[in-house]
Image: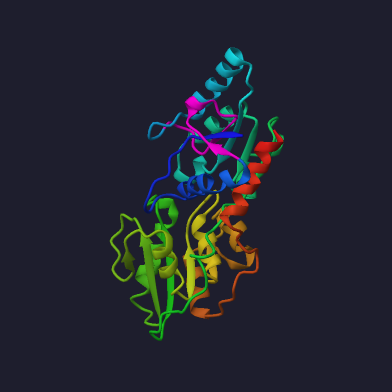
């Protein structure tokens, strides 16, 4: 079976969607798929993004291609849409409608979390829908030796510098650190802030990110309405107790209700309490397993 993916792999630190694209290129061939260009008459198209990018067709163009292929050659190309976006995450007002409109013309929609599927009320859609969590490279993100500095070392990491990744909370932590000498906080990734006490590390990826993350004692995410947060999957895979904001969306689903804080005061109370337990929600699965689930949907269409 021939498959086209409407995104190319980006080397280096990038958003979580790029990790899925990379995994799809690696593991789909092991499930019997040949990754082809759109001109090589694919049997199935995996839509990893809505708009066009880096020479790849958009979801609208893929729908047009599906109709053209059926009219011209009688070939019923299958379209699978992977949804990892929403308006709430970036405070936009056009993404939700676009996703719903496109979904009416594809063969299956896969959300990256149960929360995102519920957000879209997809149970009421006419198209078949499901949710598949992102995977993780367990050889990279794993338990390791901690920093030995006599302090409780907290970490978070984001590729996006979108304010709704939680910078209001991170600024509050930055101020609190001037009063508390028992903690450190490290931010890995992109940001537009002027931190005074938070240590900043430029974006990392792959083994460099896994090795750095595993050094810390505690993980705090302040991200809001996050569809399927890779940063939480990676922290859990490193066996780090992980606390998330009550409006974290997929973050809450992954971390569990018993690792949720309501606001900055609640978070600081949790930190000062120093009663940190490992999350007992679920163990992240491999990227191989994630892509296998996608392949099974494609084969069943």
Image coordinates of residue 151 in percent, x first then y, are: 41, 83
Identified at 32% across, 61% down, the residue is: 202
Q: How many marks?
A: 0
Residue 216 found in image quarter: bottom left
Q: Nearer the viewer, residue 160 or 260?
A: 160
* 73 left or right of 211 in image: right
User: Magenta includes 37?
Assistant: yes
Whether residue 163 is situated above or below residue 281 in the rendered picture:
above
**Residue 122 is at least partly visible in this image:** no
Whether residue 52 is situated above or below residue 165 in the rendered picture:
above
Residues drawn in magenta? 33-52
Image coordinates of residue 140 in percent, x first then y, are: 48, 65
How has the structure been colored for display? rainbow
**Residue 134 is at least partly visible in this image:** yes
The quadrant the N terminus occupies is top right
Identified at 50% across, 27% down, the residue is: 40
Whether residue 8 is situated above or below residue 233 in the rendered picture:
above
């Amino acid at each position: 079976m021939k498959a086209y993916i409407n995104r190319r792999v980006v080397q280096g630190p990038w958003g979580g969607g790029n990790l899925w694209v990379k995994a799809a290129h690696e593991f789909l061939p092991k499930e019997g798929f040949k990754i082809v260009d759109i001109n090589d008459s694919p049997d199935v198209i995996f839509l990893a993004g809505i708009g066009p990018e880096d020479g790849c067709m958009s979801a609208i163009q893929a729908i047009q291609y599906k109709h053209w292929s059926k009219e011209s050659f009688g070939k019923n190309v299958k379209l699978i849409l992977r949804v990892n976006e929403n308006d709430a995450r970036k405070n936009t007002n056009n993404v939700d409608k676009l996703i719903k409109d496109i979904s009416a013309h594809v063969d299956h929609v896969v959300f990256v979390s149960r929360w995102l599927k519920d957000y879209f009320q997809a149970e009421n859609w006419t198209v078949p829908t499901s949710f598949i969590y992102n995977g993780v490279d367990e050889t990279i993100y794993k338990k390791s030796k901690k920093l030995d500095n006599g302090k409780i070392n907290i970490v978070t990491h984001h590729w996006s510098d979108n304010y709704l990744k939680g910078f209001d909370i991170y600024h509050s932590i930055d101020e609190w650190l001037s009063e508390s000498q028992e903690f450190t906080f490290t931010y890995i990734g992109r940001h537009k802030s002027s931190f005074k006490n938070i240590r900043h590390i430029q974006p990392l990826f792959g083994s460099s990110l896994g090795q750095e993350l595993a050094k810390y004692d505690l993980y705090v995410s302040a991200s809001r309405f996050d569809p399927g947060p890779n940063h939480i999957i990676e922290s859990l895979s490193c066996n780090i107790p992980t606390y998330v904001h009550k409006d974290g969306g997929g973050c809450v689903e992954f971390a569990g209700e018993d690792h949720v804080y309501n606001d900055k005061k609640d978070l600081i109370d949790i930190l000062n309490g120093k009663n940190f337990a490992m999350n007992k929600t679920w163990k992240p699965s491999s990227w191989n397993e994630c892509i296998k689930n996608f392949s099974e949907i494609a084969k069943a269409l």
